[in-house]
Amino acid sequence: MELYIKTPEDPNFDPKGIDIESELGQLLTQIETILFTNKGEVLNDRNFGASLETLIYDVHFNEFEIKRTVNEQLESYCPLAEKYNVEVDVSFARGEERDIAQINVIVDTQYMVGVRI
């Protein structure tokens, strides 16, 4: 069982949510946690987290390196990812002030966790 961490800004927010019991729900929560956590923010595990903004803007990684980093995080911290078909897709688009990165983690071709930075 996982704690319910969605915020009211999330389009799938459930105001009655306290915990998540389904495996798929737990996996999606784990993926979100990895994507929205920077390395060093979790006590006792300085490697947890994708640090996406750092990868994209400070280090200027390309889509293959970002995809590799997210996949490594999934392999290390999401044991449920082994039970499902999990794919990471990364693309870039031109923005007005700076480029935009879109990172999507797709589970079984129908559930998705996406981040636009």
Image (spheres, rainbow, N blue to C red):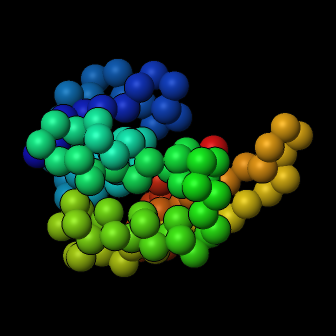
Identify whether 30 is placed above or below 44.
Answer: below
Quadrant of residue 17 within the rendered picture: top left
114 horizontally vs 83: left or right: right
Question: Above or below — where is 22 with respect to 84?
Answer: above
Position of 35 relative to 70 (above/below): above
Is 99 left or right of 26, judged from the image as shown?
A: right
Q: Going by the image, does 3 lie left or right of 48?
A: left
In which quadrant will I find the C terminus?
top right
Q: Is residue 15 left or right of residue 93?
A: left
Q: Residue 23: x and y, percent? A: 20, 58
Q: Residue furthest right?
A: 96
- Residue in the picture at 27% in, 51% down: 48
Which residue is farthest front? 59
Q: On the rendered image, what quadrant is the N terminus found in?
A: top left
Q: Residue 70: x, y in percent?
A: 42, 64
Q: Position of residue 35 (x, y in %)?
A: 42, 49
As drawn, 20 above or below 48: above
Number of labelled discs? 0
Q: Residue at x 53, y 47 (%)?
A: 54
Does residue 46 show up?
A: yes
* Horizontal and vertical percent position of residue 72: 34, 70
Identify the residue at horizontal 73%, vertical 60% (top origin).
92
| Image point (16%, 37%), residue name | 43
Residue 28 visible somewhere in the drawing: no
Q: Nearer the viewer, residue 70 or 45?
A: 45
